[in-house]
Amino acid sequence: MTMRAPFRTPLLIIPFIPSVAFAQTIAQAAGLFNVFAGLMFMGAVLCFVGGLITYFVRLGTVEREDGIKIMEWGVATLFMLVVILAVVHVVQGNPAIVAIAFAAIIIGAILWIAINAAPSEKKEEKK
């Protein structure tokens, strides 16, 4: 005896159910940035401290500016960390508003592409 079609169809749908497929929401995906934020913080602090050590070790030499450049990279990384954490906080706190804003950005980009990709109707003057 063969399996009937009504019994096979639910078996094919099971992998696409979110709880089975381990689908993540936007807020859960944004939570993954917390891991990257921790790594970024650690790298920024190590970069800044390494630049500070380089700055003090090279007292009286011309290469002392390398320490300042390294510290600038550390400060820039910390700034990016603050920006990323702010975005994650907004996404986790207001997923509906973020979805609407994301949709508006996508629609705006599509409209911009459509307007700029349209052939221009410039008339060439004959001399």
Image: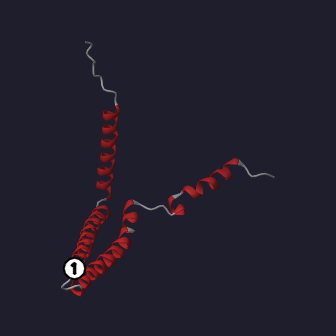
Q: Residue at x 24, y 87 (%)?
A: 57
- Observer-nearest of 75 and 22: 75
Query: Local crowd at mark 1 within 10 Å, few (<14), some, or many (≥20)?
Result: some
* Residue extending farthest left: 60
Picture layout, residue 109 above or below residue 61: above
Amino acid under label 1?
A: Arg
| Percent x, y of residue 75 | 23, 73
Q: Residue furthest right?
A: 1
Q: Name the spot of residue 12 as percent of width and height, x first.
A: 63, 53
Q: Quadrant of residue 80?
A: bottom left
105 or 19: nearer the viewer: 105
On the image, which quarter does residue 45 sit in?
bottom left
For the image, the number of numbered tags is: 1
Determine the residue positioned at 27% across, 13% down.
Answer: 126
- Answer with left or right where residue 36 lies relative to residue 89: right
Q: 46 or 85, which is in the foreground?
A: 46
Q: Looking at the picture, does residue 90 appear above or below residue 58?
A: above
Q: Name the secondary structure under disc 1.
A: helix
Instruction: Describe the colour scheme in one phrase.
Output: secondary structure
Residue 55 at x, y = what percent? 22, 82
Between 114 and 12, the residue placed more toward the observer is 114
Q: x and y percent of residue 127 in the render?
A: 25, 12
| Extreme-top residue of the structure | 127
| Circle 1 residue | 64
